[in-house]
Image (spheres, rainbow, N blue to C red):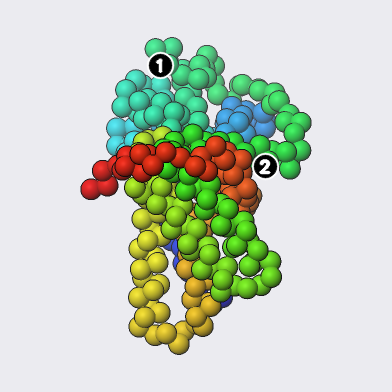
Amino acid sequence: MLNYLILYTSLKLTLDFLINNYYLFNEHIYKSYAEKNIINNFKNDNNIVNYVNKKTNKKYVITFDDKNIYDNMIYKELNDYNINLLENYHYKISGIIINKINNDLIDKVNYINKYLSKIYIISTNPEIDCDILLDKEIDEYIINFDEDERTFIMKQYEYIMNAKKIDIDVSHNHPVNKFVHFWSSMIMIFFSYYYLLILNYYNMVISFFIAHVIRQSGHFFYERQDLNLEKLKFGHKNKSKKEIIITLIGFNGLIYYDDNIITYTEYLFMNIIICVLPHFIEIIHKYGIVIATDWIIKIITDPFTDILDFYEYLIIHPKCFLDIKNIL
């Protein structure tokens, strides 16, 4: 079983890395190697690019000016730029430097800022609604960064609790969804986690499966999800849930074809791992191992915080169950 997990993890991380680097860097790398672009070094570390990178915890600034390319900048041609790449790779892009008005690009950045993450708009053009207006060469700016006095543990705690709040605000509004989350959390705490502690994996998996069927029924049948607001979520989204279903079908098809691959208990346990592992790998690729660990801690502790958040819905009016959304 471990061999399959290692192989799957390696293949997915490699594929994500190759796709990311091709679409994000292909034009930049080609022109740099062809010596059509020259990458300059900033005179000091307290520069604008490092500033927006630190503020957003990202890596790169997109520039459309081939005359002023510095460290941690990616050059793109504005006329040929696919603005959807900004949304696809927002987790790596801390800012854009744009001096010509392009409403489509600005609208896309504003959309990302609202629903995904912050991307700074940097410009020398006062007609552009930007975050940072330049009145001299970018290398001449020296910015003193404010030190964050919070400890590492406090930063992660606040990150996790904020992720829980966003998750509840965005995806847990229907009374039935709150009801099933409360009772599925009770099942997980008093059965799944208990069986895990006494190493009874078979009953742990069965109770976990029952709890999640109950839990996800609220999302599937009742919760009316705004797919734009859903992008604010830290955890699983509509797309990643569909990917899990496909992966589970493929895995179960493989076991059906050859039931000697793993034991029955391992088979049940693997179904749980598949529900978590793909998204965990995706978070590692996009945000790093610390944020991925934060997500694992979040989903492990969700049953406990869900009881505190949804205890008022341990009993609801029967008419709430008639308010089923259109799932077609």
Nearest to the observer: residue 46 or residue 191: 191
Image position, residue 290 (x, y; %): 64, 49
Q: Is residue 206 visible?
A: yes
Q: Residues within 10 Å of mark 1 (few under 14, many from 20)?
A: some
Residue 22 spot, x, y in % from top left: 40, 52
> Helix, strand or loop at disc 2?
helix
Residue that extends furthest to the top in the rendered view of this protein: 126
> Could you tell me how many numbered marks the image carries?
2
Numbered badge on residue 101: none
Task: Answer above or below: position of 136 versus 302.
Answer: above
Which three-letter amino acid code belongs to the residue tagged 1? Ile
Residue highlighted by disc 2: 156
Q: CA distance from mark 2 to mark 1?
A: 36 Å
At a point 76% along the width and 31% down the height, the residue shown is 149
The answer to which of 38 and 152 lies nearer the viewer is 152
Q: Left of 181 or right of it: where is 99?
A: left
Label 2: few (<14), some or many (≥20) within 10 Å? some
Q: Does dot 1 land on a helix, a strand or a loop?
A: loop
Q: Residue at x 62, y 56 (%)?
A: 189
The numbered dot on residue 128 is 1
State which tag comes first along the sequence, 2 or 1: 1
Residue 207 image offset from top left, x and y in percent: 53, 64
